[in-house]
Image: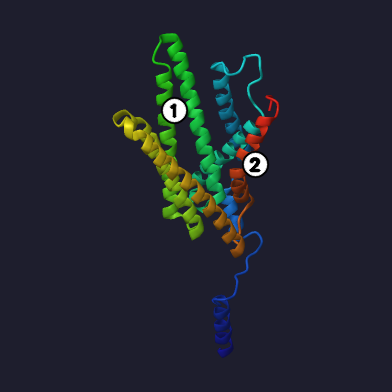
Amino acid sequence: MNETHEEGMSADASAVKPYESPTFDSEDTPTSQESEKIWPSAKMFAFGMAIGFLLQLSIASHQVFFGQNRLLRPIPWGASKILFAIVSGLGITLLAHALWHRKFFALMPGHWLFIWRATDFSRDTVVTIYALLAYFVSSRYGGPGANTLLQGSFWAMLASNFVLITLFTAILVFSRESRPWKFFIWACLFLQIFIVIQLLGAVFVKQRHEDFFDVFNEVTQTLILVSKMTLTLAGITAIVVDLFRRRRRDMYHYLGLAQVLAVPLIAHSFRFLPSRF
């Protein structure tokens, strides 16, 4: 009886040792379970990239219809355009899949950046579709034309920034990321707020206080620049802290971080190549 009691106590003690790392079977680790629930399958990723290609096709068609490219010339596709489409398609897929499985707040910082890129790309697509519709309507029935296009672009940009503000606010409130990454998100949030202020000022301040608008514009541009510099430094600091603490991240997190620098750099480099790129 005593032996049975002692064996039970030793088993309980070994089960609650506070400084012993828990052991998991290779198939039951929390990381693998989370990744299976969060990450889409290869088919889902292919579907997301297809969406990105379709969005890019609509933007390219806008350039063709508005005479920026001759109709006999191939639609302006190339490595840089394809890269933007792939990144945006992945961001859309990650967001949809995470929301469907209610795992949005388990996403990592690199995943947020994928979604940010997808939001910008989707905004450009909405503006393009709106521009095409306005073009066909004005050409058939007449209308303000350029005024309508400007209004559509303004509302699309404003809506996309409010989507990002909502996204970053939700991450700040519910995400369990470390303080450096929370500071990074604060910088992203302020950047979007300053952009919204600049957009609204371009409409309302310029109309009512044209003399004051130049000062207002310089102040908002300065705030936007400071926000961009702050989020860059905060992002670098957060990455260093992750490496120092040996935080476990997946491949898509690092791809999301890398695309922030790689996508604009590659797109800029292709400007020096022949036009087919």
Nearer the observer, 225 or 101? 225
Residue depicted at 44% across the width and 9% down the height: 140
Question: Can residue 200 be seen in this snapshot?
Answer: no
- Can you give x and y, in whole percent of width and height, for residue 247 in the image? 59, 61
Residue at the left extreme of this rendering: 208
Question: Can residue 100 be seen in this snapshot?
Answer: yes
- Can you give x and y, in whole percent of width and height, for residue 236 in the image? 57, 54
Q: Earlier in the sequence, mark 1 or mark 2?
A: 2
Residue at the bottom extreme of this rendering: 2
The colour scheme is: rainbow
Residue on which the image places disc 2? 42
Say above or below: 191 vs 244: above
| The N terminus lies in quadrant | bottom right
Residue on which the image places disc 1? 153
Nearer the observer, 48 or 68? 68
Quadrant assignment, res 48:
top right
Nearer the observer, 146 or 35? 146
| The C terminus lies in quadrant | top right
- Can you give x and y, in whole percent of width and height, for residue 143 in the image? 39, 13
Which residue type carries mark 2?
A: Ala
Q: Residues within 10 Å of mark 1 (few under 14, many from 20)?
A: some
Where disc 1 sits, the SS reads helix
How many numbered discs, if any? 2
Residue depicted at 55% across the width and 86% down the height: 5
Q: Is residue 222 left or right of residue 10?
A: left
Q: Is residue 213 left or right of residue 103?
A: left
